Image (spheres, rainbow, N blue to C red):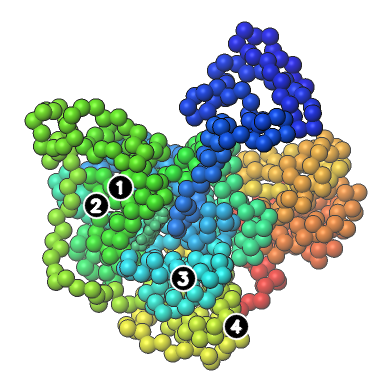
């Protein structure tokens, strides 16, 4: 029971608790709970009743206001990208870019611009898990001095469709099937594969979606892409085409499918938590913004159309030029106010950046503005704090649902003579569109230059390392095996044969459907002469680092605190953190304090693991399934495993043989920790794959 403090500001009061207990709290005047009208509330525990046992009275305006507000706490979730995680940060250009663009935030390398970023999955609802096989949204709002610029991209550089008119069909096909309301957050069902198998233009994107890109290790480990070709425009009005790329400073990395599935159960918020904790720990995620810049002549020389969002320009053809860096250094203070209410829109653009007539982008320029009406309730969403520009904002738009600004004066129109100081257009500073000549007959058709749907899909396959190719085979096999309509499976196998006969054969064999592929006639024969692009492989370019990773040590009563400390120090030096997992979460004999309890900390949650039990502890854990699974899963997920001598009975129960060439490293001897860290830097021990998975 808390005692009332003797303070002139404080008021002591008693609260009747269910069960008759009475306790007292103090409330200073400026802490007083009020209604939304500012009326002080005397009792927040009991509704107003006629007598202690009721009935409750309708006049209880405190109760009714509170419940009414609660009833309306949810706003419609985004129709796509509903599940997201946000963070604040800043962007800083690496050099003056005035040659290419007049965009104010890209002129001075000393100047930083605040950003808010929202990462998301696409298909699942707001309450779905973080690790489905899915595209990740990568949306950045730059609060520049000339207005907000939103770069609303994905972690995959191409898209499923070429024309916005197909977007509702695509999304309807991937979302839960409308009659049964499942599956949630999954493309592995008939309607998705039915649709895409009838849309050859989706083949390139499907290769990315079935690759490791769609099961990233964390949001800190994803690349980002603007997808469409944009323009940069300089002060002389000259335009350069650009593709935007984000590159994470710690490199791109992915999980294995089995890992992603198990993480979904062990921690549905795995990626949101990871981002939050990294920022909270001061381990700020960082990306380089790079562009591929090219002129019209280069665009004309490419073997595909730069307006086609199903195509990439390989980095080996037009290299990336880094232009800035972005650091995320602040978590939201309120998820709803910031992450949920942030409104991105590709049409939020600033002088110096412009669109191209990509027909997918055109549809987006309508859609994102329109959707805010139903999501945020009206045309004044720009007044919500997270959406407000940081530069002055003035015009004659007035009124509307939930208007916050209170513009004074008689004049709400232009031209006017009654308010000479009111806002006017500014031909010098104002946004001018690049004068792209756009005349042509009115027509509904796809250009011929959009017709090749297979060549870059084939190029993607050929750019992958053998393990990545294996994962693509497994992903198609998994997804198509979930499809119950045989004709859809056969149609997809036909497309895979066209993408690359070896891919088609391997998937058909894995599904037990050799010789059943439907023959598909492509509009344009796939090319055989595109060079592989090594930059597309995550494994091929993975940096040998454990920076930003988490290693877990399994400890017990009697574990050696000094050994744990030595490991912690060594990991810290590499920029990685150590979490202690034990059968019980309370302090252990021997002085160590665990961070997590074994049942809630399966090894899927960590990048590499170390078993450091005491002799007695190991004997006990050899009989605990969660502990044996901890090692077995780490083994199956190709993680580096460190162990001390005491672990022997557990390893033998798990069927794991110590073998440092396979990343199973004894760490108590000299150089043991270094050897373990060396193995962990490989991220996955690919040589082990053949021991644990059928090679299809
Ligand atoms: Fe989106 N998309 N999209 N999209 N998109 C939305 O906007 C849409 C597309 C992307 O964190 C919606 O405010 C159409 C490509 C991201 O808030 C909606 C088309 C790319 C986000 C919408 C596309 C994206 C969205 C849902 C085809 C990568 C999340 C709620 C013409 C370049 C932004 C909302 C956030 C969100 C429409 C295709 C990325 C409905 C019509 C291509 C990252 O307006």
Disc 1/disc 3 C-alpha distance (Å): 29 Å
For residue 145, what is the image quadrant?
top left
Say which element carries label 1. Answer: loop
In percent of width and height, residue 552 lies at 71, 48
Say which element carries label 3. Answer: helix
Left or right of 87, for residue 264: right
Asked if 458 appears above or below 265 in the picture, the reply is below
Name the residue that disc number 3 marks: 173
Nearer to the camera, 553 or 182: 182
Mark 4 / mark 3, whichever is N-terminal: 3
Q: Are marks 2 and 3 in contact (CB under 8 Å)?
A: no
Disc 2/disc 1 C-alpha distance (Å): 10 Å
Picture quarter with the N terminus: top right
Disc 4/disc 3 C-alpha distance (Å): 23 Å
Say which element carries label 2. Answer: strand
Q: Are marks 1 and 3 in contact (CB under 8 Å)?
A: no
Ligand 1 is found in the corner quadrant, namely bottom left
Mark 2 / mark 3, whichever is N-terminal: 3
Query: Which marked residue is nearer to the observer: mark 1 or mark 3?
Result: 3
In the rendered structure, find residue 556 and report the number of the disc placed on it: none
In percent of width and height, residue 364 lies at 32, 58
Asked if 18 appears above or below 120 in the picture, the reply is above
Name the residue that disc number 2 marks: 354
Name the residue that disc number 1 marks: 348
């Amino acid at each position: 029971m808390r005692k009332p403090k003797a303070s002139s500001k404080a008021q002591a009061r008693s609260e009747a608790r269910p069960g008759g207990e009475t306790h007292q709290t103090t409330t200073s005047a400026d802490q007083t709970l009020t209604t939304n009208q500012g009326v002080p509330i005397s009792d927040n525990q009991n509704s107003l009743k006629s007598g202690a046992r009721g009935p409750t009275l309708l006049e209880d305006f405190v109760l009714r206001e509170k419940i009414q507000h609660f009833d309306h706490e949810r706003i419609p979730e985004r129709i796509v990208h509903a599940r997201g995680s946000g963070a604040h940060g800043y962007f800083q250009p690496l050099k003056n870019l005035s040659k290419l663009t007049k965009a104010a935030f890209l002129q001075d390398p000393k100047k930083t611009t605040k950003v808010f970023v929202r990462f998301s999955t696409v298909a699942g609802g707001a309450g779905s898990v973080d690790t489905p096989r899915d595209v990740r949204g990568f949306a950045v709002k730059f609060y520049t001095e000339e207005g907000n610029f939103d770069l609303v991209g994905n972690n995959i550089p191409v898209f499923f469709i070429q024309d916005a008119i197909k977007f509702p069909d695509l999304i309807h096909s991937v979302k839960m099937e409308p009659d049964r309301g499942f599956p949630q957050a999954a493309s592995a069902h008939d309607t998705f594969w039915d649709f895409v198998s009838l849309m050859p233009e989706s083949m390139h994107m499907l290769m990315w979606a079935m690759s490791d890109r769609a099961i990233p290790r964390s949001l800190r480990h994803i690349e980002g892409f603007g997808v469409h070709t944009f323009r940069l425009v300089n002060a002389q009005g000259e335009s350069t085409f650009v593709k935007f790329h984000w590159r994470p400073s710690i490199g791109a990395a992915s999980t294995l499918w089995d890992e992603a599935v198990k993480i979904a159960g062990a921690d549905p918020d795995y990626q949101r938590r990871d981002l939050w904790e990294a920022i909270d720990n001061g381990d700020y995620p960082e990306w380089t913004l790079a562009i591929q810049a090219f002129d019209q002549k280069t665009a004309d020389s490419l073997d595909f159309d730069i307006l086609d969002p199903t195509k990439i320009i390989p980095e080996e053809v037009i290299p990336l030029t880094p232009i800035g860096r972005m650091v995320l250094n602040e978590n939201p203070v309120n998820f709803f106010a910031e992450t949920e209410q942030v409104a991105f829109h590709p049409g939020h653009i600033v002088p110096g950046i412009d669109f191209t007539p990509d027909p997918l982008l055109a549809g987006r320029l309508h859609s994102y503005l329109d959707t805010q009406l139903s999501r945020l309730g009206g045309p004044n969403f720009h007044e919500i704090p997270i959406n407000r520009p940081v530069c002055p904002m003035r015009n004659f738009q007035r009124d509307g649902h939930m208007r916050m600004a209170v513009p004074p004066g008689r004049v709400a129109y232009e031209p006017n003579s009654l308010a000479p100081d009111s806002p006017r257009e500014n031909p010098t500073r104002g946004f001018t569109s690049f004068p792209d000549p756009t005349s042509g007959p009115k027509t509904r058709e796809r250009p011929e230059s959009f017709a090749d749907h297979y060549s870059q899909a084939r190029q993607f396959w050929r750019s992958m390392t053998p393990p990545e190719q294996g994962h693509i085979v497994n992903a198609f096999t998994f997804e198509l095996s979930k499809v119950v309509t045989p004709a859809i499976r056969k149609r997809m196998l036909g497309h895979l044969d066209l993408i690359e006969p070896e891919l088609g054969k391997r998937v058909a064999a894995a599904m037990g459907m050799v010789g059943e592929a439907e023959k598909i006639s492509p509009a344009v024969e796939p090319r055989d002469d595109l060079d592989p692009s090594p930059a597309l492989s995550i494994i091929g370019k993975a940096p040998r680092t454990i920076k930003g990773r988490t290693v877990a040590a399994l400890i017990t009563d009697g574990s050696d605190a000094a050994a744990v400390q030595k490991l912690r120090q060594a990991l810290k030096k590499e920029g990685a953190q150590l979490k202690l997992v034990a059968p019980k979460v309370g302090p252990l004999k021997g002085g160590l304090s665990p961070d997590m309890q074994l049942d809630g900390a399966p090894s899927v949650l960590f990048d590499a693991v170390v078993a450091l039990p005491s002799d007695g502890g190991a004997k006990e854990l050899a009989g605990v399934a969660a502990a044996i699974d901890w090692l077995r899963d780490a083994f199956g997920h190709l993680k580096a495993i460190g162990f001390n001598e005491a672990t022997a009975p557990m390893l033998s129960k798990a069927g794991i043989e110590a073998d440092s060439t396979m990343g199973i490293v004894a760490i108590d001897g000299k150089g043991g920790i270094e050897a373990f860290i060396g193995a962990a830097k490989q991220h996955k021990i690919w040589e082990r794959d053949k021991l644990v998975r059928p090679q299809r």
